[in-house]
Amino acid sequence: MIEIKDLHKSYKMGSNSLHVLKGINFSVEEGELVAIMGSSGSGKSTLLNILGMLDNSDSGEYILDGVPIKNLNETKAAQYRNKFLGFVFQSFNLINYKSALENVALPLYYQKVGRKERLEKSLKYLDQVGLKEWAEHLPSELSGGQKQRVAIARAMAAEPKVLLADEPTGALDSKTSYEVMDLIQKINDQGNTILIVTHEPDIADMCKRIVHLKDGVIIEDKKIKQVRAEQYV
Ligand code: ADP
Ligand code: MG
């Protein structure tokens, strides 16, 4: 599903340059649940943003579902991004003046899905995250965990090939974090490919594989026996 080879990324700041990714190689098969682990500043978000086509690498290869992602113009990149990728962020990034349902429907609107199908699909995905009864509520009326579940429903509604989540539990208390991880595990059980960035070891243990980033390189990449979040919720 994902293949990256010798990926490099630097940030230029005035006359200085910060080399953040120093030759990253890895691949992800369909159906994996991968944690990208590392301390703050280790380049996790930089890597995820490149994988999410929100940013470009300086050099290296990136092949997403057989498509080489390089030198795509912005229109083409946006097309692939909408078609292939779903995003979940630490800060939820919901639109405050839109209901939970309207938030979930948004990517479908951009995909030009008709109104009726948009509504049906959005309700289906809200139901899947256990929030059908909250469809008409605004984000301000939802708890942090509920907001993140709406964000996950929104990401899944577009039926992406890969779900990318940057610190999805970073703003949540531990019990709520486990609820969100339980949902993520269940979505992965259905065969969806998911990459999660986290600096929390107990969240990484709930994935199936941990890729450990340090000083711009992968220092460890191991399959693990997944800890089920269900037992903590
Ligand atoms: P992490 O997500 O692991 O905390 P990041 O990928 O956000 O790490 O950042 C890696 C390093 O790159 C940090 O030192 C950070 O300050 C720097 N950095 C991130 N984004 C930018 C940017 N847009 N411009 C300059 N430096 C950046
Ligand atoms: Mg980060």
Image (cartoon, rainbow, N blue to C red):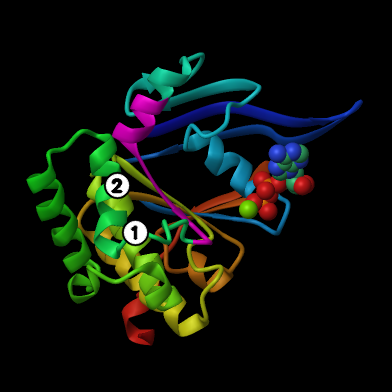
Whole-percent x, y for residue 125 in the image: 19, 59
Does the magenta run of residues contain 79?
yes
Q: Nearer the viewer, residue 223 or 29?
A: 29
Residue 204 drawn above or below residue 202: above
Q: Which residues are magenta?
A: 78-91
Residue at horizontal 47 percent and vertical 20 percent from the top: 74
Residue 28 appears anywhere in the view: yes
Q: Nearer the viewer, residue 62 or 225?
A: 62
Task: Name the residue tied to disc 2.
Answer: 106
Task: Name the residue tied to disc 1.
Answer: 98
Residue furthest right as drawn: 15
What quarter of the picture does the N terminus occupy? top left
What quarter of the picture does the C terminus occupy? bottom left
Residue 215 appears anywhere in the view: no
Residue at horizontal 52 percent and vertical 61 percent from the top: 90
Q: Nearer the viewer, residue 80 or 99?
A: 99
Q: Nearer the viewer, residue 129 or 47?
A: 129
Contact? badges 2 and 1 (CB < 8 Å)? yes
Does the magenta run of residues contain 56?
no
Label 1 SS? loop
